[in-house]
Image (cartoon, rainbow, N blue to C red):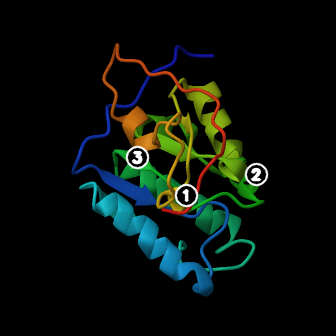
Amino acid sequence: MADIRYPAPLMPGSRIEVPAPSMGVPDELQPRLQEARAALVAQDYDLHLREHVSRGGLVPASAAERAADLQAAFVSRPGAVLPPWGGELAIELVDRLDWPAIAEAGSWFVGWSDISTLLLPLTLTTGLATMHGANLMDEPWELPTEFWRWTQVAALHEGESFSQEAAPFRRSRP
């Protein structure tokens, strides 16, 4: 494995690409998607919802289309790539992605659940640090005081650190 390299700190004004490599967001949850988007826009981030995000179902597109869209999200060199949430079939993308090209972008890749299926090979094959943290649809939730938001962690500069402790709950509605 290569030495771990960290993406540049996420700054206000940074673009955040939102692809759907696993599941998209069905119609009935579009208001929540817009609320999550608004939460990050209010923090001065430039959110770009990609083509498949607003498509519901087990998967929003074929594996080839989802892989191409995820690849394109990274190639555009955003500050971060943040899927709406996990799902079940991100594994279909692993052999379809150009991991060195994705790492070349130097962007934060953030998520959990099924997205972990993509975080691990990116870090192990290229040495680019990824972040096991909230997905976009978690954004409007209030976190316990013991937790840091992924945006706070991604904004840290080289040499800075943080600590996080176990919390009494994972999240609650604002």
Task: Say if 79 sits above or below 32 in the image.
Answer: above
Q: Amino acid at mark 1?
A: Asp
Alpha carbons under labels 2 and 1: distance apart: 22 Å
Q: Residue at x 62, y 81 (%)?
A: 26
Q: Amino acid at mark 2?
A: Ile
Query: What is the count of numbered marks?
Result: 3
| Disc number placed over residue 91 in the picture, else none | 2
| Number of the label disc, if any, that sits on residue 67 | none
- Circles 2, 1 touching at the beta carbon (< 8 Å): no
Q: Residue at x 49, y 72 (%)?
A: 33
> Do residues under tags 3 and 2 come within 8 Å of each other at their CB atoms?
no
Comes first in the chain, label 3 or label 2 = 3
Q: Is residue 15 depicted above or below 84 in this figure? A: above
Q: For the residues marked 3 and 2, what is the alpha-carbon distance in whole angstroms?
A: 21 Å
Residue identified by numbered label 1: 138
Q: Position of residue 167 (x, y in %)?
A: 63, 36
Q: Which mark is residue 80?
A: 3
